[in-house]
Image: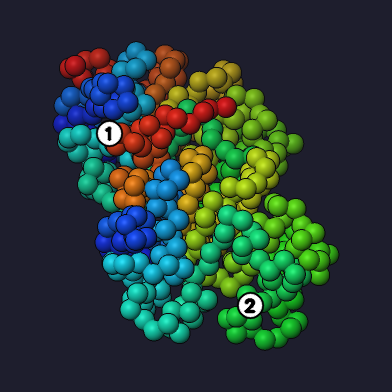
């Protein structure tokens, strides 16, 4: 049996007296996509911010096990942590403007990420950037254009390219299709899905859209008031929810 | 072999006055390799529920469902995922696909996901599309625009493309004309001849006869 890539035990984070997330335990195996759902304020973003190193939790353990090397994420030095985040993790923000530098060319945004993990050869960086522009269906002739000239959907695809180009081991996505038009959403989802399959990515995705979770996630957790109230296979949680809140959530979805 | 042992299943609807619906009490049956079992009974009796319990989409209250010597009821999520990938094919009643993905890609996907190479997956999928009588000009289009019968055949192709020892079929021959129904029946037979254990819901007598199924009448099997 393979060991989990990520093991979280009793993770808690509060903001003064307000609970962000409490006693979260979960595990994720290589190649799995985990969906996190819950209403706003339920602690979804707090949780992935803790897991991705953007927030320091109050208590708990986060252990990454990558290529048989264990990293005790909350007990390593700041510099080791920075390096780990840079090379092994990636974070796709809901708003692509948070994950990109808008005054740097599209190719520059991608190249910068490559350089951060040690790539120095300009030609290689440019050809890899071109390859990834192609992969996320952005015309390669736009490589020298500034992202401010891109549409919302293109920006999101650029952000995805930037994050995936360094082959991170765990990718966090916070509502990656949240701010997009429905038609553009389908395209981005479709892209994420094909990349997940093709590259066997391990992903933690936050979304309030159950259809997105159903489409992308193998497993899911449902959060309420900072706690995980239900977890399991996505199809199981969505088709046979065991908790009152999950049933309410599932039955509230409109079917077109 | 699939073994369903003393299974109880109910649903509690918390948001509807905690209504409790009991679907099965003490459900028992076995499916041997190569056997085709047809679940029978009126709508609402729980035919699809059985397939979903075996596939792990529904949680059972009590009892065991044994596949490959493993009890689905006690497996972790990732163990069920693995078991599905290596052993269980499930053809749902309706095709669920996302826009923009071609019929060919929909069919190839299960093979690619288990690490088959692209060329091989392509060849197998093309063969199945031909066997299923899907016109060539549709192969590269999204099945969302297809007719009901065409969608159903794509769904079957996706479920049949891998050689898995267990198959769960939810109305695979519904909404097909007689010619295409016979094609599907022959594909199911071929699976059965290779030793696959099959549990299906077949709405028509014709399919059940042709497939020489063993019927399980849920009205008799489950004492409500």
Q: Position of residue A47 (x, y in %)?
A: 40, 58
Q: Nearer the viewer, residue B55 or B126?
A: B55
Q: Nearer the viewer, residue A102 or A66?
A: A102
**Which quadrant of the structure image shows residue A25?**
bottom left
Callout 1: chain? B
Dot 2: what SS?
helix
Residue B124 seen in the current view: no
User: Which SS class for mark 1?
Assistant: strand
- Marks 2 and 1 sit apart, C-alpha to C-alpha, by 54 Å
B134 versus B41 height, above or below: below
Task: Give the residue displayed 22% in from the left and 47% down from the top.
Answer: B74
User: Who's the residue at 54% across and 51% down the image?
Assistant: A175
- Camera-side residue: B140 or A99? A99
Disc number placed over residue A114 in the picture, else none: 2
Is residue A103 visible in the rendered image? The answer is yes
**Relative to B49, B151 lies left or right:** right
Q: Residue furthest right?
A: A141
Q: What's the chain of the residue with tag 2? A: A
Decide: marks 2, 1 in contact (CB < 8 A)?
no
Q: Is residue A54 above or below residue B121?
A: below
Q: Position of residue A96 (x, y in %)?
A: 64, 59
Q: Residue A11 in the image: state x and y as whole percent.
A: 30, 62
Q: Dividing the picture into quarters, in which one does residue A199 lie? A: bottom right
**For residue B71, side relative to residue B46 (left or right):** left
In the figure, is residue A170 to the left or right of A138? Answer: left
Percent x, y for residue B1? 27, 40
Task: Look at mark 1 in the image and give the residue it sits on.
Answer: B31
The residue depicted at 19 percent of the width and 38 percent of the height is: B64
């Amino acid at each position: 049996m393979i060991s989990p890539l990520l093991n979280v035990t009793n993770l808690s984070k509060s903001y003064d007296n307000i609970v962000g997330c409490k006693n979260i335990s979960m595990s994720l195996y290589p190649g799995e996509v985990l969906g996190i759902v819950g209403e706003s304020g339920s602690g979804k973003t707090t949780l992935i911010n803790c897991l991705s190193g953007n927030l320091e939790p109050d208590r708990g353990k986060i252990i990454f096990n990558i290529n048989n090397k264990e990293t005790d994420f909350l007990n390593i030095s700041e510099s080791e942590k920075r390096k780990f985040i840079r090379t092994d993790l990636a974070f796709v923000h809901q708003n692509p403007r948070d994950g990109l530098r808008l005054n740097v060319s599209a190719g520059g945004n991608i190249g910068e990420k490559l350089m951060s993990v040690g790539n120095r050869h300009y030609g290689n960086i440019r050809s890899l950037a071109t390859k990834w522009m192609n992969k996320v269906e952005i015309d390669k002739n736009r490589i020298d254009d500034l992202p401010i000239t891109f549409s919302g959907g293109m920006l999101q695809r650029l952000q995805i390219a930037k994050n995936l180009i360094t082959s991170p081991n765990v990718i966090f996505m916070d509502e990656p299709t949240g701010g997009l038009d429905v038609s553009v959403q389908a395209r981005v989802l479709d892209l994420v899905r094909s990349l997940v399959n093709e590259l066997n990515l391990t992903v933690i995705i936050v979304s309030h859209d159950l259809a997105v979770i159903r489409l992308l996630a193998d497993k899911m957790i449902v959060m309420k008031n900072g706690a995980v109230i239900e977890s399991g296979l996505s199809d199981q949680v969505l088709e046979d929810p065991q908790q009152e809140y999950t049933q309410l959530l599932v039955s509230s979805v409109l079917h077109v | 072999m699939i073994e369903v042992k003393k299974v109880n299943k109910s649903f509690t609807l918390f948001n509807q006055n905690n209504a409790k619906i009991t679907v099965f009490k003490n459900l028992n049956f076995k499916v041997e390799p190569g056997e085709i079992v047809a679940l029978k009974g009126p709508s609402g009796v729980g035919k699809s529920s059985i397939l979903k319990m075996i596939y792990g989409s529904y949680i059972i209250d009590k009892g065991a469902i044994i596949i490959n010597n493993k009890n689905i009821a006690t497996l972790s999520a990732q163990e069920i995922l693995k078991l599905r990938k290596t052993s269980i094919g499930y053809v749902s009643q309706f095709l669920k696909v996302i826009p923009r993905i071609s019929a060919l890609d929909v069919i190839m996907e299960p093979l690619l996901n288990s690490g088959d190479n692209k060329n091989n997956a392509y060849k197998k999928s093309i063969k199945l599309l031909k066997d299923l009588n899907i016109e060539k000009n549709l192969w590269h289009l999204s099945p969302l625009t297809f007719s009901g019968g065409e969608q159903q055949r794509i769904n079957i192709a996706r479920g049949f493309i891998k050689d898995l020892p267990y198959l769960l079929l939810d109305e695979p021959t519904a909404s097909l004309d007689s010619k295409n129904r016979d094609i599907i029946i022959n594909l199911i037979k071929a699976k059965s001849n290779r030793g696959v254990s099959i549990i299906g819901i077949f709405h028509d007598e014709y399919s059940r006869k042709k497939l020489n199924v063993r019927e399980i009448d849920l009205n008799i099997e489950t004492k409500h």
